[in-house]
Image: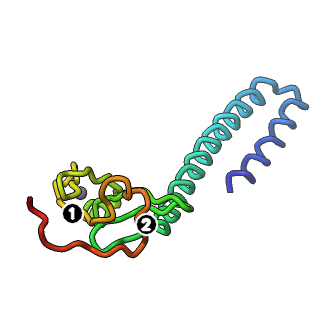
């Protein structure tokens, strides 16, 4: 109940000043000020943590799994793909890099097969349910 303590403290400061006990009042005021600054710091830390949690929840709602990799759906935009292993293991969205007929994760070195629709110009317009191209991955 920090605010109750502070309210009591401020009243006490008022009394001290009224009684002419300036030095005591000043010391108490200084202590209250320090306490207030600490509370402000704590408050902004909590706010930041709350925002981070909200971002993670928001992110989780927009992450789509295509059977191999993850994609981030942001309105009409589709970003990715991202590594399935890294996201499942660490909660990190690691961009996959085109590597021949595969997508490669630079972090864990996993390879994911590239589907026909993901190649070249069509990469930006992948439909949510594109078929996987199996076999013939080595060339
Ligand atoms: Zn990875």
Residue 30 left/right relative to 108: right
Q: For ligand 1, give the image quadrant.
A: bottom left
Q: Residue at x 32, y 61 (%)?
A: 118
**Which image quadrant is residue 65 in?**
bottom left
Residue 118 left/right relative to 53: left
Residue 16 left/right relative to 83: right
Q: Earlier in the sequence, mark 1 or mark 2?
A: 2
Locate the N terminus and report the quarter of the image it occupies. Answer: bottom right
Badge 1: few (under 14), some or many (20 or more) residues near its Cα, within 10 Å? many
Please tell me which residue lies in front, 61 or 19. Answer: 61
Locate the C terminus and report the quarter of the image it occupies. Answer: bottom left
Please tell me which residue lies in front, 36 or 55. Answer: 55
Which element carries disc 1, helix, strand or loop?
strand
Please tell me which residue lies in front, 129 or 31. Answer: 129
Which element carries disc 2, helix, strand or loop?
strand
Q: Position of residue 6 (x, y in %)?
A: 74, 46
**Which residue bears the numbered disc 2?**
63
Q: Residue furthest toward the front? A: 121
Q: Residue furthest toward the left? A: 139
Q: Residue at x 27, y 64 (%)?
A: 89
Badge 2: few (under 14), some or many (20 or more) residues near its Cα, within 10 Å? some
**Which image quadrant is residue 112 in?**
bottom left
Q: Position of residue 22 (x, y in %)?
A: 81, 24
Mark 2 residue's CB less than 8 Å from ligand 1: no
**Which residue bears the numbered disc 1?**
112
Q: Position of residue 116 (x, y in %)?
A: 28, 65
């Amino acid at each position: 109940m920090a605010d109750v303590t502070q309210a009591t403290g401020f009243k006490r400061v008022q009394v001290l000043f009224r009684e002419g006990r300036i030095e005591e009042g000043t010391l108490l005021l200084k202590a209250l000020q320090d306490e207030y600054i600490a509370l402000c710091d704590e408050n902004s830390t909590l706010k930041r943590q709350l925002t981070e949690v909200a971002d993670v929840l928001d992110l989780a709602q927009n992450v789509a799994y295509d059977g191999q990799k993850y994609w981030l759906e942001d309105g009409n935009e589709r970003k990715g793909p991202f590594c399935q292993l890294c996201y499942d293991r660490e909660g990190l969205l690691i961009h996959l890099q085109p590597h021949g007929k595969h997508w490669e994760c630079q972090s864990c070195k996993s390879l994911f097969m590239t589907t026909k629709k993901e190649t070249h110009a069509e990469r930006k317009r992948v439909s949510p349910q594109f078929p996987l191209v199996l076999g013939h991955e080595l060339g």
